[in-house]
Image: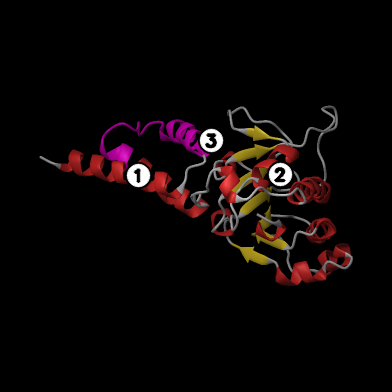
Amino acid sequence: MRLSGIRIVLVQTTHPGNIGAAARAMKNMGLERLCLVDPASFPHADATARASGADDLLAEATVHATLEEALVGSHLVFGASARLRTISWPQVTPREAARQTADLEEGSEVALVFGREHSGLTNRELELCHCLLHIPANPAFSSLNLAAAVQVVSYEMRLAMEQPRLPASEEGGETAAATAEELAGFYRHLEQALLEIGFLDLANPRQLMRRLRRLFNRARLERMELNILRGILSAAQKSSRRP
């Protein structure tokens, strides 16, 4: 797992200058993959000016209509947030996130998601992430600007990637983690199956599904494990349809 497997995802960035400043912060630390979700204005001269030599990252940045689209192919997703949430969600610091990233098998993809400048990520967007990434700043003044947050997280990622990695044989073997889109498909299947067997309360489906997402995100499912679970769901659905 090297820096090339890490993507920075900016969600609905309001000011194009912040995109450029984030690109500069990324390039300082050797990160090159920038994904933009529904930016207010891009490309833009302000983004180019603030990039200060990181124009190549802007030129190669990908623009996506939804966060789900931007996360395709990622095996581990961290959602950055300056504020802690009322919902309980696995939480890590940038250093802990970097350690988890460094421990992934070769070829894995990691997404670091940053929300809107003034309101951050919604709870719905956070549900697409495995962990909430929180920078432990001064509690009396904890809100970093977008580029500063990207810089802190990118720095920790670079430090972790520079550490020597044990051969797979010494780690006890490696298995493929489920990707973000595979997990999304599983959650859709899970919700449909729970509805069919009468377990999901139609009056309040969100609370149960949020808790189940939290459970399975914390488990960091492997692809084989995910296939087993989907097989169980399919069997339960068939059983419920029998007269």
Amino acid type for the residue under numbered disc 1? Ile
Contact (Cβ within 8 Å) of mark 3 with mark 2: no
Labels in figure, total: 3
Residue 218, numbered label: 3
In three-dimensional space, the C-alpha distance between marks 2 and 1, rounded to whole angstroms, equals 29 Å
Mark sitting earlier along the chain (1/3)? 3
Amino acid type for the residue under numbered disc 3? Arg
* Viewport quadrant of the C terminus: top left
Residue 98, numbered label: 2
Q: What residue is drawn where x is 83% and y is 55%?
A: 25
Q: Is residue 196 left or right of residue 75?
A: left
**Is 193 one of the magenta-colored residues?**
yes
Secondary structure state at the residue bearing disc 3: helix
Q: Is the residue 43 above or below the residue 30 in the image?
A: below
Q: What residue is drawn where x is 89% and y is 65%?
A: 52
In the image, farthest residue toward the left: 243
Amino acid type for the residue under numbered disc 2? Ala
Q: Which residues are magenta?
A: 192-219
In three-dimensional space, the C-alpha distance between marks 3 and 2, rounded to whole angstroms, equals 16 Å
Image coordinates for residue 197, horizontal then vertical, percent: 26, 36
Secondary structure state at the residue bearing disc 1: helix
Mark sitting earlier along the chain (3/2)? 2
Which of the two discs, 1 and 3, sits closer to the camera?
1
Q: What residue is drawn where x is 31% and y is 31%?
A: 199
* Viewport quadrant of the N terminus: bottom right
